[in-house]
Amino acid sequence: MTNCIIRSLTVRSIKLLICLVTIAALAAVAPAVEQGDPSTMPQKSKRPQAAEVAEVAEVVEAAQAAAEKPNGAAKAEEQAENQESVDYSKAAIVNRDEPEALNDGTTRITFDVRSPSMKRDIKTAIVLPPAYEAEPQRRFPVLYALHGMGAPYKAFTDMSPLRRTMKERPFILVTFSGDAAGWYIDSTVRDDSQFATFFFDELIPSIDEGFRTRTEATARGVTGFSMGGYGAMQYMLSRPDVIGSASALSGAFSYMGELSGRPHGSLVSLLGNYQQNQDNYLKYGIFNRIEQFVKDRKPLPPIYLHCGTEDHLIGENRQLAAFLIKQNQLLRSEKAGYSITFQYQESPGAHNWPFWRDASAGVADFHYRVFQTPPAKKDN
């Protein structure tokens, strides 16, 4: 109990507490000297009980430890203590807030999804179209939307152009926190960063169980901006049997180092040193994975790419578009009988919120067209 109280205080408050507790301790230990009180005679001066002295010492020691401990370390310790009392044996929606009615008729709900793979709760938000309440028997396709590095996890839920399309083209929008730089992959270094396992084994089943969703692959798409654009492609390439379409705005497609040999610095904490762990990086490379799909003659779901002409990532987006064209040429020359369906678009804009917000309506249109694809017939 003492530790919980101490941890909640600021460092300045803790220092003040140390002073007050120390003064109180000294006052308790020192003999009373108030004149006129027979009990103040030196030969009969009262001393505190041993238990009282020990309790005072414990409080002072705890306060000093909390004051010296970095705020981040104290918070991590508190989270670890809380985790010990939580059941992470099964994924579940928890801490669900009251629905929030937005001004365009959509409804936003925030909650956490309990992650057994990471032993923590992941912040999640969902936007329901107006038709969700109006047609209680209907099931809806789902668009999962991934934020960029350091961006708010609810960013896509704030994109009003995207939300406005949901009135005429109803689908469910789902966003979640992929950490500031989690890259939507399973880390080989950190047990608490397993975002591929979380997405497929925990988030999607929780959404399907908690809401009226369509569950065929063609009714499930994934999009994202910047780091989230990479994540969208990564998820689609990992499970095309689960994800029926993928799109990216300003996608960060080359940061695994497969083209330059210089991966993004934030990946070291997830995949280890690049020179010593190149295989960990290359297996997550978008270009490598698409090339392998073509070699194995495995069709890919439809892809939509959009980047601003003033974006610092325009070069690698053009590289990916050219790479997809090249793969299609290879498929035609070898009479594979299919090609990669993709759309590439450029328009004025930079690597920023105004571009992603305004481009979000095109993302919704692309995915909704795919959502209309009839489910593939299962073999008897």
Image (cartoon, rainbow, N blue to C red):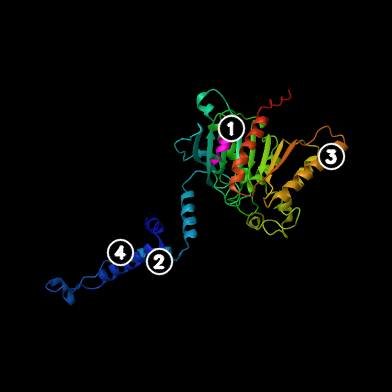
- Could you say which is closer to the camera, residue 313 or residue 147? 313
Image coords of residue 173 (percent x, y): 57, 36
Q: Residues within 10 Å of mark 4 (few under 14, many from 20)?
A: few
Q: CA distance from mark 3 to mark 4?
A: 83 Å
Residue beneath disc 4: 51
Q: Residues within 10 Å of mark 2 (few under 14, many from 20)?
A: some
**Pointer 3 or 2: first along the chain:** 2
* On-image quarter of the N terminus: bottom left
What secondary structure is the magenta-colored segment mainly? helix
Image coords of residue 252 (percent x, y): 68, 49
Q: CA distance from mark 4 to mark 2?
A: 20 Å
Q: Residues within 10 Å of mark 3 (few under 14, many from 20)?
A: some
Please say if the residues under marks 1 and 3 sit with CB atoms less than 8 Å apart: no
Please say if the residues under marks 3 and 4 sit with CB atoms less than 8 Å apart: no
**Pointer 1 or 2: first along the chain:** 2
Q: Residues within 10 Å of mark 1 (few under 14, many from 20)?
A: some
**Pointer 4 or 2: first along the chain:** 4
Helix, strand or loop at label 2? It is helix
Residue beneath disc 1: 165
The amino acid type found where label 4 is placed reads Ala
Q: Which residues are magenta?
A: 158-163
Residue beneath disc 3: 329
Q: Which quadrant would residue 40 be assigned to in this image?
A: bottom left
Which mark is nearer the camera, 1 or 2? Answer: 1
The residue depicted at 68 percent of the width and 59 percent of the height is 273
Q: Is residue 378 magenta?
A: no
Image coords of residue 333 (percent x, y): 88, 37
**Pointer 1 or 3: first along the chain:** 1
Q: CA distance from mark 4 to mark 1?
A: 68 Å
Q: Which mark is residue 64?
A: 2
Which mark is nearer the camera, 4 or 1? Answer: 1
